[in-house]
Image (cartoon, rainbow, N blue to C red):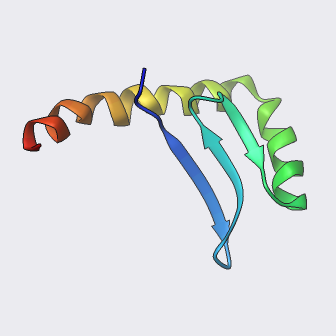
Amino acid sequence: KDIQYVDSYCYNKLEFIRFDSNVGKFVGYTELGVKNAEIWNKDPSKIAAMKAQREAVCMNNVGIDYQVV
């Protein structure tokens, strides 16, 4: 539950949109990011794919990372 997947999109060192697995949707931080977030959040397959990334990326590697610590 404390494992979080974050996928940020940046341009010119400015983050304009982010997917956060705890929120479960895209959040826009600029005018362009808000418009893209609205479009991307309407696509259930894109949201499902991003949520699946938490399982595929984070949960598979958490055991490896904690062994090192």
Q: What x and y, as percent, mark residue 34?
A: 86, 50
Identify the image quadrant of residue 44: top right
Q: What x and y, as percent, mark residue 18?
A: 66, 49
Q: What x and y, as percent, mark residue 15?
A: 68, 63
| 60 horizontally vs 38: left or right | left
| 41 horizontally vs 23: left or right | right
Measured along the vertical axis of the image, is residue 66 above or below residue 33? above
Q: What x and y, as percent, mark residue 66?
A: 16, 36
| 15 horizontally vs 65: left or right | right
| 15 horizontally vs 49: left or right | right
Q: Name the residue at 65% across, 27% down.
A: 24
Q: Name the residue at 70% across, 32% down.
A: 25
Q: Residue furthest top?
A: 1
Q: Name the residue at 83% across, 29% down.
A: 42
Q: Quadrant of the C terminus?
A: top left
Identify the image quadrant of residue 41: top right
The answer to which of 13 and 2 lies nearer the viewer is 2
Q: Quadrant of the N terminus?
A: top left
Measured along the vertical axis of the image, is residue 7 above or below residue 48? below
